[in-house]
Image: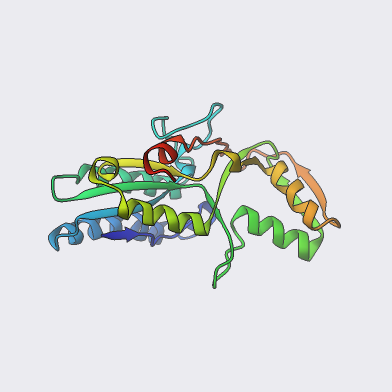
């Protein structure tokens, strides 16, 4: 089993180094699929993203239209399609579309929304919000790990060729809701609202499929 997590992650970084992002996120993924099949890898788990849904006015699930609004999403969607098209009797691909990650890691990422808001609250006593009513789903890094383990243990019929959103419905928050939660823990924080059209992504995600099929 191969769990493919490696990527240039996030819209800002992919925009900054677009050639490397395409090479690493898309070209290398295709090469890894071919190498895996050549060496008899049975199951291939791919780390994708809920940001593939782009901007949606209704709750989205795995059957909803995908709408890439960034190079990052484009590379993930192209990789998803390539991986799923390689499914056969000896190769079981599965796509995990992760919600926005949060949690502590050895190399902390402060470009992810929870950590970014926490950093700004603690260091600056201010959270600046662009698009306060835009929705985001969140998932803790422990749950991401457990989802990967679930796909290793799952039977062929519920894993091969399947796409799963990874998260929990109750962890859908608007940016403003998230900032208000953080303010409860850092009371000195002020919240500054800035209306913008720079980042149009807003998506509220259903996680019923992974709950029902994988009991996750």
Quarter occupied by residue 134: top right
Identified at 80% across, 58% down, the residue is: 186
Identified at 34% across, 59% down, the residue is: 4
192 lies left or right of 34: right
Identified at 13% across, 45% down, the residue is: 89
Protein image colouring: rainbow
Quarter occupied by residue 29: bottom left
In the rendered image, residue 193, in percent from the top left (x then y), is placed at 77, 43
Q: Is residue 164 above or below residue 149?
A: above
Q: Is residue 121 above or below residue 82?
A: below
194 lies left or right of 110: right
**Looking at this view, is 104 or 32 the one in front?**
104
Quarter occupied by residue 163: top left
> Which residue in the rendered view is the most extreme toward the bottom?
106
> Which residue in the rendered view is the most extreme toward the top?
58
Q: Is residue 199 visible?
A: no
Quadrant of the snapshot with the N terminus: bottom left
**Looking at this view, is 205 or 109 the one in front?**
205
In the rendered image, residue 15, in percent from the top left (x then y), is placed at 49, 54
> Which residue in the rendered view is the most extreme toward the right?
188
In the rendered image, residue 132, in percent from the top left (x then y), is placed at 70, 40
Identified at 68% across, 43% down, the residue is: 175
Count numbered badges in the picture: 0
Q: Is residue 183 visible?
A: yes
In the rendered image, residue 184, in percent from the top left (x then y), is placed at 79, 52
Q: Is residue 156 above or below residue 6?
A: above
């Amino acid at each position: 089993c191969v769990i493919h997590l490696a990527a240039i992650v996030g819209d800002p970084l992919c925009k900054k180094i677009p050639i490397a992002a395409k090479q690493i996120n898309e070209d290398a993924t295709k090469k890894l699929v071919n190498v895996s099949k050549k060496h008899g890898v049975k199951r291939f788990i791919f780390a994708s993203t809920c940001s593939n849904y782009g901007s949606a006015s209704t709750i989205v699930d795995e059957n909803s239209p995908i709408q890439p609004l960034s190079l990052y999403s484009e590379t993930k969607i192209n990789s998803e399609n390539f991986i799923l098209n390689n499914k056969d009797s000896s190769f079981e691909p599965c796509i995990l579309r992760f919600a926005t990650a949060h949690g502590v890691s050895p190399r902390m990422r402060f470009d992810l929304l929870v950590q970014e808001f926490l950093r700004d609250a603690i260091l600056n006593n201010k959270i600046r919000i662009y698009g306060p009513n835009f929705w985001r789903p969140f998932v803790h890094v422990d749950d991401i790990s457990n989802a990967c383990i679930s796909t290793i243990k799952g039977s062929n019929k519920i894993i091969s060729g399947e796409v799963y959103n990874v998260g929990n419905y109750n962890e859908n928050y608007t940016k403003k809701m998230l900032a208000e939660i953080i303010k409860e823990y850092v009371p000195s924080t002020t919240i500054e609202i800035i209306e913008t059209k720079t980042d149009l992504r807003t998506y509220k995600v259903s996680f019923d499929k992974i709950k029902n099929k994988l009991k996750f």
